[in-house]
Image (spheres, rainbow, N blue to C red):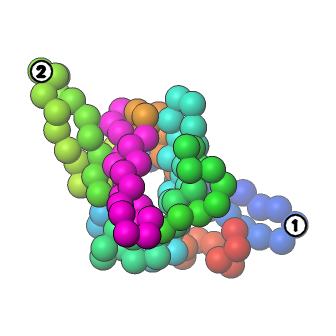
Amino acid sequence: MHCETSFDSSSHLSSCSLPDSVITFDDIDCNDKVLIRTLNSEYRFSVTDPTNHKGMLSGGSLGEEPREAFLIECLGKDEKGIVKDFRGLKTGDRALFYLSSGRRIERVTTSKISSLTVVKATDRTSLIS
């Protein structure tokens, strides 16, 4: 895991960039922010309820307006080409989210994740950063 800290005029930001890694559900806490990069998109998942894997998702095909979402799992294939799931986020796999939309549920699946960055709530000086 590669972690770095940066400073600007008003805040301190600590983040861990995970180019070839996994984030399990146990690694995610309330108010953590996860940046999910794929080949063509970037998604931001701000965790509001880690027990239920719930948060606000924006970016990619959703646009910039955050939507309530549930992180379900990551989907990928093993060396034999058999589809497997992972309870968390993992580079090389696709993230699966469910979003509530009125009376129906939308499914959002990212393309393959190329990198993950976690900004821990405990490392931020304010919830704005």
Q: Position of residue 84 (x, y in %)?
A: 16, 38
Judge whether 50 appears above or below 5 on screen. Answer: below
- Residue type (three-letter) at the residue carrying disc 2: Lys
Near mark 1 (Cα within 10 A), the count class, few <14, some 14-19 or many ≥20, is few
Q: Is residue 89 visible?
A: no
- Magenta residues span 91-110
> Which of these two is toward me, 70 or 33?
70
Q: Tell me where residue 25 appears, x and y as whole percent.
A: 30, 63
Residue 70 in picture, x, y percent from top left: 37, 64
Is 60 colored magenta in this rendering? no
Apparent side of residue 18 relative to residue 58 in the rendered image (left or right): left
Quadrant of residue 125 within the rendered picture: bottom right
Q: Which residue is mark 1?
A: 9
Q: Which residue is mark 2?
A: 80
Amino acid at the residue labelled 1: Ser
Q: Residue at x 46, y 76 (%)?
A: 48
The C terminus lies in which quarter of the figure? Answer: bottom right
> In front of the other: label 2 or label 1?
2
- Determine whether the residue tagged by mark 2 lies in a helix, strand or loop: loop
